[in-house]
Image: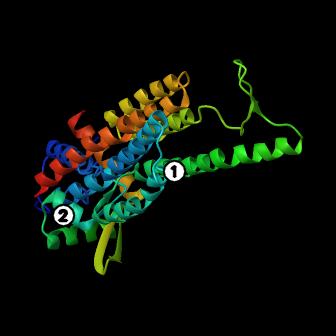
Amino acid sequence: MFKELDPILHSQLRLAIMSLLISVKEAEFTFIREKTNATAGNLSVQVQKLKDAGYIEVIKQFKDNYPQTTCKVTPIGLKAFEDYVKALQQYLKV
Amino acid sequence: MANETKFSEQESLQLIAEMIKKAKGSYHDTGIGSLLWGGVVSIASLMNFLQRTYDFKLWFDIWWLVLAAIIPQVYISIKEKKIQKAKQYDDDLVNSVWLVFGISLFAMGFYQNIVPFQTEKLIAEEGWTLMKHFSDGRPDEVIRPFTPSLYSIYILFYAFPTMVTGLVKKFNPMKYGAIITYGLFLLSLFTESRFDMLLGSIAALVCWFIPGIILRRKYLAQTRSNV
């Protein structure tokens, strides 16, 4: 029986954010925006959804008098991402 | 990128692969640190070799140049930290290796300067001294104890963090530089200490300066492509 794909991750932008964050230890909001080509508003909403699900940690601080938002994957997020990839492999019989 | 667009499983996998590739390809060292240290250590070693070969002295100890390079390095590190938007998993490991390498080099400098003096003091307390005896009848000379061919150990040290960085970052120029430097270390075991300086100069070039040029080119190419 096929495992249902996680609806939080099975969305283009949220999956792109998670895939980026999986590859690095942490990344600034501007980095994610650059790589996904998303608008700041749209990205903020999706980052918040991932944060609410406990998949990512969002750290807001000031750097040289400018606000800086840094994101990193949590252990829950890592597990969810692994499960998502496993489910995908099941679907595709990879 | 659309936020809630439904897409196929195949597209999901493609997106994951594409994003991982983008994240991995997003980071390049600026190369300035490698160029700085490669240049400074190479010049200092070469100058030391020339001073000893052509018997002249500069008005300052050339190794102070290496010490002085810490100041621009601190500035470079702060500046690079500011422009770095994503932190890789292996950054902390590589930075720690270079920090330990720096501390070890300074510790070696203390060893090199303190041990001969202390040994001379200790053997004087025991009531004997080290003498150079010439077989051609020239009068004996008192000599200060020293560690023979110590620069060979420095050359060996140069290879260590370079090899670790090359292996962790999968950066072949540093791997090859370290392998060549291990060869230079072996060669230095058979050469007199003045030539060890020349080998050390080559080691700094292959370990840091040449990889620094390659890193700088990659970084500039990436910066241009981001514009």
Left or right of B16 in this view: B169: right
Q: Residues within 10 Å of mark 2 (few under 14, many from 20)?
A: some
Where residue B80 appears, x then y in whole percent?
32, 61
The colour scheme used here is rainbow
Where residue B132 appears, x then y in whole percent?
73, 29
> Which of these two is toward me, B75 or B21?
B75
Check the image and report above or below for B86 versus B19. below
Q: Which residue is mark 1?
A: B102
Where residue B53 appears, x then y in whole percent?
46, 33
Where residue A3 appears, x then y in whole percent?
29, 46
Check the image and report above or below for B193 versus B81. above
Left or right of B221 in this view: A68: right
Check the image and report above or below for B92 versus B165. below
- Label 2 resides on the chain identified as A
Q: Which residue is mark 2?
A: A33
Disc tally is: 2
3D distance between C-alphas at marks 1 and 2: 37 Å
Identify the element where label 1 is drawn: helix
The circle on residue B217 is none
Check the image and report above or below for A50 versus B30. below
- Label 1 resides on the chain identified as B
> Which of these two is toward me, B210 or B129?
B129
- The amino acid sitting under disc 1 is Gly
* Quadrant assignment for the N terminus of chain B: bottom left
